[in-house]
Image (spheres, rainbow, N blue to C red):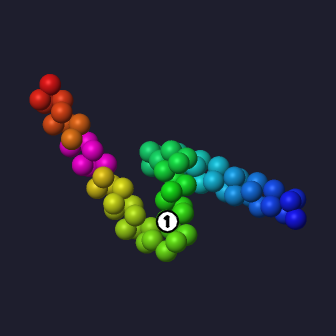
């Protein structure tokens, strides 16, 4: 039973490594933790396109805040 669990864990790690490499090739800017969260959300039924839109909007808002901070300093 333990060997099956280990094999499953290794498969999950390999899958996440491949997804991270694809993410890097596509310049998504997602780190392993963020990518893992996105995968789990998609597995729970979240629409990937909607998730992508939310991430893009959050990045825009973050960039806007950084720009406004730089202007005030």
Residue 68: where, in percent of width, then height?
15, 37
Who's the residue at 54% across and 63% down the image?
A: 40
Is 28 left, or right, of 53 in this rendering? right
How many C-alpha atoms fall within 10 Å of the one at disc 1: few (<14), some, or many (≥20)? some
Residue 14: where, in percent of width, then height?
71, 53
Who's the residue at 28% across and 56% down the image?
A: 57
- Residue 40 visible, this angle: yes
Magenta segment: 59-64
Residue 37: where, in percent of width, then height?
51, 57
Is 10 left, or right, of 68 in this rendering? right
What residue is disc 1 on? Answer: 41
Query: SS at mark 1?
Result: helix
Q: How many marks?
A: 1
Is the magenta region chiefly helix, strand or loop? helix
Who's the residue at 43% across and 72% down the image?
A: 47
Is 51 left, or right, of 67 in this rendering? right
Instruction: Indicate whether residue 57 is drawn in magenta.
Output: no
Who's the residue at 80% across and 61% down the image?
A: 5
Front residue of this view, candidates 53 and 62: 62
């Amino acid at each position: 039973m333990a060997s099956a669990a280990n094999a499953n864990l290794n498969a999950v790690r390999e899958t996440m490594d491949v997804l991270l490499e694809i993410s890097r090739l596509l310049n998504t800017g997602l780190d392993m933790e963020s990518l893992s969260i996105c995968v789990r959300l998609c597995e729970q039924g979240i629409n990937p396109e909607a998730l992508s839109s939310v991430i893009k909007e959050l990045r825009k808002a973050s960039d806007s805040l950084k720009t406004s901070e730089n202007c005030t300093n």
